[in-house]
Image (cartoon, rainbow, N blue to C red):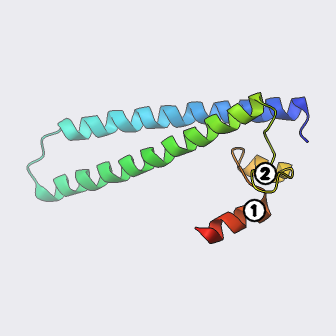
Amino acid sequence: MLSDKELQEFKTLLEERKEQILKNIDASEKEMNSLKSTHVSDEADQATINTDTAIDEALNRKQLQEIKEIEYALFKIQNKLYGICEMCEEDIGIERLKVKPQAKYCIVCREIVEKRG
């Protein structure tokens, strides 16, 4: 069971990560809008812009998913459920939480979930 101090540290860490992701998404969207408004006559340049835009959109989707995970972890902190594996209900190791603060599963259960696909 995590102490109140540890919970506060993870809350701060998660909030900072969420803020950074939102900044990244904003910067990416501004860049994509700038590229889309640029008139390019060369097909190779247009293909590069299209590829870059597709990559940025995929990254943004991944980051939006991470924000959802962070918000869920913050909800769990608020409700004193943070750090408990959603499968086996054992404590998630603090070292795992340091690596992935929004983790829902302990290491053992994460491997089971990944094998199930």
| Left or right: residue 77 compared with residue 115 | right
Q: Amino acid at mark 2?
A: Cys
User: Image height check: is 86 above or below 73?
Assistant: below
Tag 2 or tag 1, which sits nearer the N-term? 2
Q: Which of 12 and 108 lies nearest the eye of the viewer?
A: 108
Dot 2 falls on a residue whose secondary structure is loop
Q: Amino acid at mark 1?
A: Cys
State the quadrant of the N terminus.
Answer: top right
User: How would you rate the neighbour count of disc 1 (Cα within 10 Å): few for under 14, some for 14-19, many for 20 or more?
Assistant: some
Q: Residue 108: tell me if it is visible.
A: yes
- Labelled disc at residue 67: none
Q: Residue 13: tell me if it is visible.
A: no
- Labelled disc at residue 109: 1
Q: Which residue is mark 2?
A: 85
What is the residue that sits farthest to the bottom in this orientation?
A: 115
Q: Position of residue 58 (x, y in %)?
A: 40, 51
Could you tell me which residue is drawn at 81 percent across and 46 percent down?
84
Q: Are marks 1 and 2 in contact (CB under 8 Å)?
A: yes
Q: CA distance from mark 1 to mark 2?
A: 8 Å
Q: Position of residue 90 (x, y in %)?
A: 86, 52
| Left or right: residue 48 compared with residue 100 | left
User: Image height check: is 115 above or below 17?
Assistant: below
Could you tell me which residue is drawn at 69 percent across and 38 percent down?
73
| Left or right: residue 108 compared with residue 71 | right
Dot 1 falls on a residue whose secondary structure is helix
Q: Position of residue 19 (x, y in %)?
A: 57, 30
Could you tell me which residue is drawn at 36 percent across and 53 percent down?
55
